[in-house]
Each structure stands twice: as structure tokens, then as C-alpha cells.
């Protein structure tokens, strides 16, 4: 199965949301991982709260902030839009979603980012076959 890494500096908010939604919405076509170049002691608590509210997903149940070295080799790398130089992670396809970090902002701003991640996950799921031209479900 195709492996996708969602990468952000601290691996505490957007990339964690993407991992959770990837598992929920596209787990039948790709495995989702998230990681960063640094870690935080816990996942962003606003993200945790809103993901529980919106999707019934408890990100803290199976997810934690991880370094890039802690995930397996991946086929697709998605950067969240951290506005910093992203580390090189070998992959077959790379894209940048250019998402603003909602940390410290209103719930409304958080929900906008979460909904955009949802749309991006569904788009990636749809494009997966075209990106790899293979049947690995």
C-alpha cells in the first residue's frame, strides 16, 4: 500500500490532523504518517478538541508528535506549508499544501484549515492511482 507522510516543523497540529483524516478518509488506499523536524510534548489541544467534535476522532489515542526518523520510508511527502526549508525526505511524489498554521487562532480559523485538509486528503485519495499507475489497494 502507498505510504504518505504529512510533514510540518513541530508535528503537533496540521500534520497530525492530516494523519488522522488520512486514516479515516483514505485508509483503504494509503497509509498515513505524520512527522516533523522537531517535536512537541503533546498534540495541539485545540486540534484534538475540534477533531473530536467534528469527526469523533481522538488523535491522542494512537498519535503522538514524531521526528522524521521515526516513520517508515514513504512514497508521497506532503508538506503543510511551514514557510521554512523542508528537509529532504526520499519519495516518489512531493507536494506542498501551503496551509496557514491555525495555532493560537479562533476555532473558526481552525475549522477552515481542518476542512481544507479534508478536501486535500480526498483529492490525494482520488489522484493516488494517477500518481502511481498501479493497483495496490
Image (cartoon, helix red, strand yellow):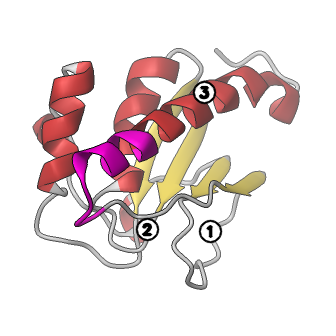
Distance Cα–Cα, label 3 vs label 2: 20 Å
Whichever of callouts 3 and 2 sits on the residue coming sooner in the sequence is 3
Q: Are marks 1 and 2 in contact (CB under 8 Å)?
A: yes
- Looking at the image, residue 23 sits to the left or right of residue 62; the answer is right
- Looking at the image, residue 68 sits to the left or right of residue 4; the answer is left
Category of crowding for the residue at label 1, using alpha-carbon neighbours closer than 10 angstroms: few (below 14), some (14–19), many (at least 20): some
Q: Nearer the viewer, residue 106 or 36?
A: 106
Q: Nearer the viewer, residue 128 or 14?
A: 14
Q: Which mark is residue 68?
A: 2
Distance Cα–Cα, label 1 vs label 2: 8 Å
**Magenta residues?**
103-113
Whichever of callouts 1 and 3 sits on the residue coming sooner in the sequence is 3
Distance Cα–Cα, label 1 vs label 3: 18 Å
**Residue 88 higher or lower than 61, as above or below:** below
**Residue indicated by mark 3:** 1
Category of crowding for the residue at label 2, using alpha-carbon neighbours closer than 10 angstroms: few (below 14), some (14–19), many (at least 20): many
**Residue 106 higher or lower than 69, as above or below:** above
Say which residue appears at 41% left-offset and 69% top-offset: 69
Q: Position of residue 81 (x, y in %)?
A: 57, 66
Q: Position of residue 129 (x, y in %)?
A: 80, 23
Judge whether residue 111 is colored magenta.
yes
The answer to whether residue 74 of the structure is visible from this angle is: yes
Q: Nearer the viewer, residue 111 or 4?
A: 111
Amino acid at each position: 500500500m502507498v505510504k504518505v507522510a504529512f510533514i510540518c516543523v513541530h508535528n503537533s497540529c496540521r500534520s497530525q490532523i492530516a494523519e488522522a483524516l488520512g486514516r479515516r478518509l483514505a485508509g483503504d488506499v494509503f497509509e498515513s504518517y505524520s512527522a516533523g523536524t522537531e517535536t512537541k510534548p503533546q498534540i495541539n489541544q485545540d486540534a484534538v478538541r475540534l477533531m473530536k467534535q467534528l469527526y469523533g476522532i481522538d488523535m491522542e489515542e494512537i498519535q503522538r508528535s514524531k521526528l522524521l526518523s521515526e516513520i517508515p520510508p514513504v512514497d508521497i511527502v506532503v508538506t503543510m506549508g511551514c514557510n521554512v526549508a523542508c528537509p529532504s525526505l526520499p519519495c516518489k511524489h512531493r507536494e506542498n499544501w501551503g496551509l496557514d498554521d491555525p495555532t493560537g487562532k479562533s476555532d473558526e480559523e481552525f475549522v477552515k484549515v481542518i476542512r481544507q485538509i479534508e478536501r486535500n486528503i480526498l483529492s490525494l485519495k482520488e489522484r493516488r492511482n494517477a500518481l502511481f499507475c498501479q493497483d495496490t489497494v
